[in-house]
Amino acid sequence: MMSLWNQKMHKGFALHWDGLETSLTETVQTGAIGDGATKKSLPVADLQRVEDFIQELPPPKYPFAIDEQVAAKGSQIFANTCASCHAFGGERTGTVIPVEEVGTDRHRLDMWTQEGADTYNHFGDGYPWDFKNLRKTNGYVSVSLDGLWLRAPYLHNGSVPSLQDLFEKPENRPQVFYRGYDVYDPKKVGFITEGDEAKAIGFKYDTTVTANSNQGHIYGTDLSDEKKKALIEYLKTL
Ligand code: HEC
């Protein structure tokens, strides 16, 4: 699931992980259809209120200590290596990055087809509401990173448990972990994904299962340990 907060800051962004929509109104309405609304019952006015709410909803602030000096160093690293794809106002922020370039698991992308987009775009024919912005893309959106600390596990398929793991080379990222346990790990920056309690409460995520791969997005993996630490400290502030 993608976070819904701050939508007004995401104006013009491609929506859904693969950018298959460009209209927020349509995203909210198609979401309602997916959740069981019918053509006749689609509650357009109520959904507009939901949309207004997520336009303004702020992300929760990081609740643990942040070392501001270290974060300031990290901010420079972010500006040099990440901002073009992830900062608000970045050249490629909110656009679809070809899957060959970002290198993450492609199954989410391949599950959606031009035919699916065409069907949806005709779904509302004859009704006062209409869908016309669904499309087929070739990659994943370079999402903004607001409220990032709370969004673990990371990437579109939730295949990387923490920020610390994301800046490791894919072969060194955890292969099997437990998702869904809600105790936070401020050291790795993500939720705790191992140990007896995580095992009992969470569910097992195996990165070798089809569509679960933790490959790709190797940006930042070559940085020194000190720089990675600074970058992560900065990412807590977003
Ligand atoms: C060329 C564009 C590009 C660059 C440069 C880039 N990223 Fe990304 N990033 C992406 C894309 C595309 C995704 C979504 C990939 C996916 O989920 O499959 C992503 C996903 C992420 C996510 C996961 C977000 C979430 O909610 O799960 C984080 C965190 C992230 N990037 C951080 C960074 C950092 C930090 C840097 C710099 C070291 C960086 N990225 C550099 C394109 C980029």
Image (spheres, rainbow, N blue to C red):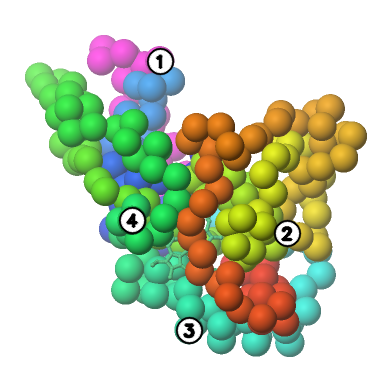
Say whether residue 134 is left or right of residue 24. left
**Circle nearer the N terminus (1, 3):** 1
Residue 205, percent across and down? Answer: 66, 34
**Residue holding disc 2:** 189
Residue 78 screen position, x and y as percent: 53, 78
Q: Is residue 225 left or right of residue 82?
A: right
Residue 210 counted in the magenta span? no
Under circle 3, the secondary element is helix
Spatial CA distance of label 1 from label 4 is 35 Å
Q: Which residue is mark 3?
A: 80
Mark 3 CB lies closer than 8 A to ligand 1: no
Residue at disc 4, secondary structure:
helix
> Which residue carries the number 1 mark?
36
Residue at which label 4 appears: 100
How dense is the environment of label 1, judged by Cα within 10 Å: few (below 14), some, or many (20 and up)? Answer: few
Disc 3 marks a residue whose amino acid type is Asn
- Quadrant in which residue 20 is drawn: top left
Q: Please name the residue shown 49% across and 45% down the image.
A: 156
- At x 67%, y 44%, the residue is 175
Residue 87 on image: x %, y %: 45, 71
Q: Earlier in the sequence, mark 3 or mark 4?
A: 3
Q: Earlier in the sequence, mark 4 or mark 2?
A: 4
